[in-house]
Image (cartoon, rainbow, N blue to C red):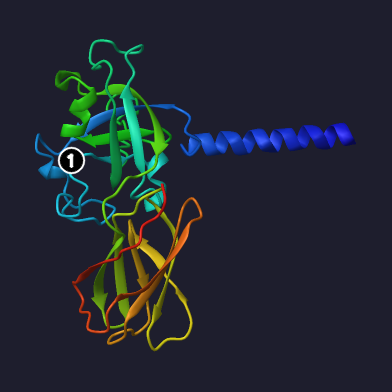
Amino acid sequence: MAGACARAALALALWCALAAAAAGQTGQWLRAHATFYGGADASGTMGGACGYGNLYAQGYGTRTAALSTALFAGGAACGQCYKLVCDRKTDPTWCKPGVSVTVTATNFCPPNWSIPSDRGGWCNPPRPHFDMAQPAWEKIGVYRGGIIPVIYRRVSCVKKGGVRFAINGHDYFNLVLVTNVAGPGSIRAMDVRGSRTPDWMSMARNWGANWHSLTYLNGQGLSFRVTVTDGQTIVFANVVPPSWRFGQSFASNLQFSL
């Protein structure tokens, strides 16, 4: 019995380790492929499934990528950072030697079921794939190659300044976009509390990096409690003043640890 329990525990530990590695959270290098989109100035990458809008204005610039279904996780990966290296052992022709690039997940690369996954349907499940902004891709790949094999791993996101909150929606629908998140970059849970509201209220992921609540909070100062995917939690107390209006953005002085 003891041996069976030990074997079961070992199998469970191995499964957990493999699951963590598949999520890119252990620092282990994993294999994928990468293409590019958006033009030489990355202007075609604006907007996207994470909801960040103008990536230049939000501070994400041209070091961004759209993730395939296997990596995007329904938007839960928005804001995560990945370090990529072109795999010269697999493809010495189109890989630039001795360089790497770090990108932030800002978009979703949808599957194309009409094309085989090895002949154009690069983002089809279960493939891990990065459709990178062209300037980021060209840091590691030769333009004429079009698609390159890469090795990648999750890394901490380094940001300047504090976490930022943009308030959108209307009276009973508060849609909050959270940007400039350091550390793991992605958000696990979020709560809101008004200055005249005694209790924290859970928010739900609406799409990408947008979270919503269905409570009338007009005219109240707002505080947010944000938990990122490595378990860190920060309370952004009164980060939004009572005079706020829909369409405004507010920067905090607080940031998550790397």
Q: Is residue 243 visible?
A: yes
On the rendered structure, is 27 left or right of 176? Answer: right
Q: Which one is nearer the viewer's eye here, 250 or 49?
A: 250
Q: Residue at x 88, y 35 (%)?
A: 2
Where residue 208 appears, as percent x and y from the top left, is 33, 56
- Residue at the extreme right: 1
Quarter occupied by residue 213: bottom left
Q: Which residue is mark 1?
A: 62
Where residue 155 appears, as percent x and y from the top left, is 39, 38
Where residue 246 appears, as percent x and y from the top left, is 21, 76
Q: Residue at x 39, y 42 (%)?
A: 156
SS assignment at label 1: loop
Identify the amino acid type marked 1.
Answer: Thr
Crowd around label 1: few <14 · some 14–19 · many ≥20 (10 Å): many
Q: Residue at x 48, y 29 (%)?
A: 28
Q: Which one is nearer the viewer's eye here, 256 or 220?
A: 256
Vertical position of residue 38 compared to residue 57: above or below: above
Q: Which one is nearer the viewer's eye here, 123 or 115?
A: 123
